Amino acid sequence: MKKITIITFLLIIGSSHSLQAQITQVELFSGFDKTDFTLFSSYPINKSQTLSLNTLAFFQKFKKENQKYDEVGLQPTLFWNITKNIALGPSTYYNSFAGYSERLSAKYTLKSSRLVLVLIPTAAHSEQTDTSYAEVFVQIQYNKPLNNNLSLWLNGQFLTIWDEFNMHSRSYQQLRFGVSFYNHQVGIGFDIDQYGLKPIEKTSFGFYYRITI
């Protein structure tokens, strides 16, 4: 496991020095019940852009009564872009709840001038529990331009994880509605988090700020 982590880390460092990021997004969500910080970046690592490195990092902190649900995660994924819409690749994921896992993901992306749809099903193995699990992630983004620099945005992210492919482990639904000015986006957000076999649900309403670099 340590060797895999070191190799992945070297890939991140090497690609970030050799090529500029194709996209980097940073979001801060501050709600009445939790604060959530998320960073996502995507780097092409060869000239033909058939290989790309996607890195997701997040930190989630709840208020005092729910601090046992505080969560940190780091996930670099190396994607091979098979077609314009389909990619496949391995990743290493660290989560403060679940420890390390090795993963294989497929990614389907559909883009238009106003709509972005991303679907990522994943099969994974957890080192902490020595079991396999399935994960499905969906992202939907819709924007409506108001003028050349100002637009309305609706963002939705949905995740569900099932241990041994049949027992619920973790899910969330995140909704964002805001206004985008150049590369800055501000607005309101609503998060629903579920934990465990018989899901314990936590909700949070608040405000968010996102910047795209």
Image: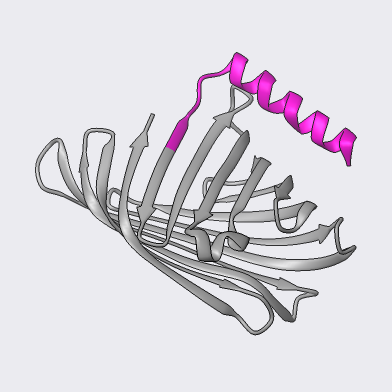
- The residue located at (86%, 64%) in the rendering is 129
Instruction: Give the left or right position of residue 19, taking residue 29 as reference.
Output: right
Residue 153 can be seen in this image:
no
State the predominant SS element of the stretch in magenta.
helix
- The residue located at (49%, 44%) in the rendering is 38
User: How is the model colour-coded?
Assistant: one colour
Decide whether residue 118 is among the magenta residues. no
- Quarter of image, res 136: bottom right
Instruction: Give residue 67's position: percent from left, percent from top.
Output: 57, 59
Image quarter hosting the C terminus: top left
Reply above or below: 122 against 211.
below
Q: Nearer the viewer, residue 190 or 45?
A: 190
- Quarter of image, res 211: top left
Residue 69 can be seen in this image:
yes
Image quarter hosting the N terminus: top right
Decide whether residue 21 is among the magenta residues. yes
Q: Nearer the viewer, residue 4 or 60?
A: 60
In this view, the residue farthest toward the front is 64
Reply above or below: 155 against 163.
above
Instruction: Give residue 12's position: percent from left, percent from top.
Output: 67, 27
Q: Nearer the viewer, residue 92 or 51?
A: 92
In this view, the residue farthest toward the top is 18
- The residue located at (46%, 33%) in the rendering is 24
The span picked out in magenta is 1-25
Instruction: Give residue 177's position: percent from left, percent from top.
Output: 26, 58
Instruction: Give the left or right position of residue 90, taking residue 64 as reference.
Output: right
Q: Nearer the viewer, residue 104 or 213?
A: 213
Counting the numbered discs, the total is 0
